[in-house]
Amino acid sequence: MSAPETTLRLLYMEDDPGLGRLVQKRLQREDWSVDLAEDGERGLALFAEGAHDVLLLDHDMPVLSGLRVIERLASENRLPPTIMLTGAGNEQTAVEAMKLGVGDYLIKDADGAFLELLPSVIRHVMEHQRLEDEKAAAEEALRASEARFRTVAETAADAIICSDRADRVFLWNRAAERMFGYTESEALGMSTRILFSDPAGAPLAKGTKPARFDSLGCRKDGALFPVEVSVTDWATQHEIHHTTMVRDVSERKEYEEKLAYMAHHDSLTGAFNRHHLSAVLETETARAERYKHPIGFLMIDVNRFKMINDTLGHRTGDLVVQAMADVLLKAVRRADLVFRYGGDESLVVLPETDGSTRFVKDHILAALEQWNKASDLLDFDVTLSIGVAHWAPGCGKTTDEVLNEADAAMYREKRASAAQDAGGAASVA
């Protein structure tokens, strides 16, 4: 069990001393004690000296990064309830940390809103640890006494099901009733095999269940939901029994899927982010090599974007970037891939081009024209500069070189557009 909240002791590893003091002061308002360490190595030393209930750590630290600290403590089975504090764009690192056992993570936003969220996240992680401790205690009690096991089982948050050698249920706790929808009287005597499906939805055959596995739970109404299952065998004087503990992981799976989405997508526009581009290029060039198809690239930039930001504000600039991404996502073909390349710059990757690059470019410009007619975001039309380049198997160029060609073509079009705007202004004058 963790220490009472009034005596909770935390260790925060953070190489920014100003931010460290801000976090320390905020948590001291909760009557919690907070020790600070300026890097991972010093943090490990402090952790070894004191009994800390919760570990907070920054991702990017000198000497030892946050991830390395977590790996070391996890390998030594000494990882306490832990929260990673990371900057925007490091969500993939947070996913890796959570796989190692980190309880949660927070993004250190520029306006400091995370400081107000942090106490509730700490309480959530401590509560999760409390439940984990209770589960471990319950499993130990099950081995010691069947009577004691029933008492613990009825108060557990996870479903606990006991079955005989023929897989017939003889104990069904309240959590199982809530989770699967069968009352105790309905469940007693039925086979546990109808409760689980493999990922394809087929019932699990008898004898195929390992001691621990991920599966799909099958509710009484036929609904499927993701579960973690642990099966333990135990013996009485006369026969072998099975204890099956089931945890509904629907929320965690949704959270992991959200993190995975954030790792590959731009949060502002919903387009793919630049981090995901290298993996896509590797896949698409291999496919192009196999089928002898070229790949087209459209490098796209918003004209006069600096003027929009400077005169109308960054919020309006963000709305323009979002709107242009939406135009691109709706205008391209289903197979095409849209990336936010940086700032107001976008990239469209066109697999299996075969002459369709011009068509897609024209379709984008036509869609932009319709957006300009329908939108009241600005009192002037938004225009785009689009540079086109192609890569083909055996062309002797790398994709980076072709991307540079597309970028150069886009800037040529941008300069031509600026000259045209200047000429039009001069003629009006």
Image (cartoon, rainbow, N blue to C red):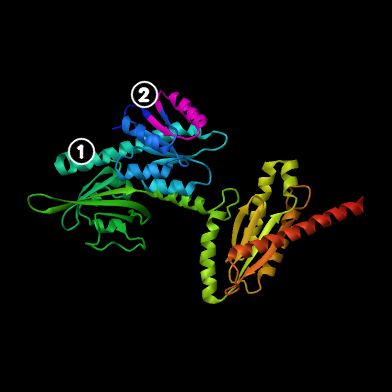
- In percent of width and height, residue 400 lies at 60, 62
Q: Nearer the viewer, mark 2 or mark 1?
A: 2
**Element at badge 2?**
helix
Secondary structure under tag 1 reads helix
Left or right? Give the position of 269 relative to 51.
right
Residue 187: give x, y in percent of width and height: 24, 51
**Left or right of 107, for residue 397:** right
Front position in the image: 391 or 98: 391
Numbered mark located on residue 6 in the image: 2
Judging depth in this view, the residue of 282 and 125 nearest the camera is 282
- The type of residue carrying mark 1 is Thr
The reply to whether residue 124 is in sight is no
Instruction: Find residue 329 and report its image quarter.
Output: bottom right
Mark 1 surroundings within 10 Å by alpha-carbon count, few (fewer than 14), some (14 through 19), many (20 or more):
some
Q: Which of marks 2 and 1 is nearer the N terminus?
A: 2
Q: Which residue lies furthest to the left in this view?
A: 237
Instruction: Using a 10 Å C-alpha cutoff, classify the residue at mark 2 as few (fewer than 14 neighbours), some (14 to 19) or many (20 or more).
Output: few
Residues in magenta, as a range: 10-34
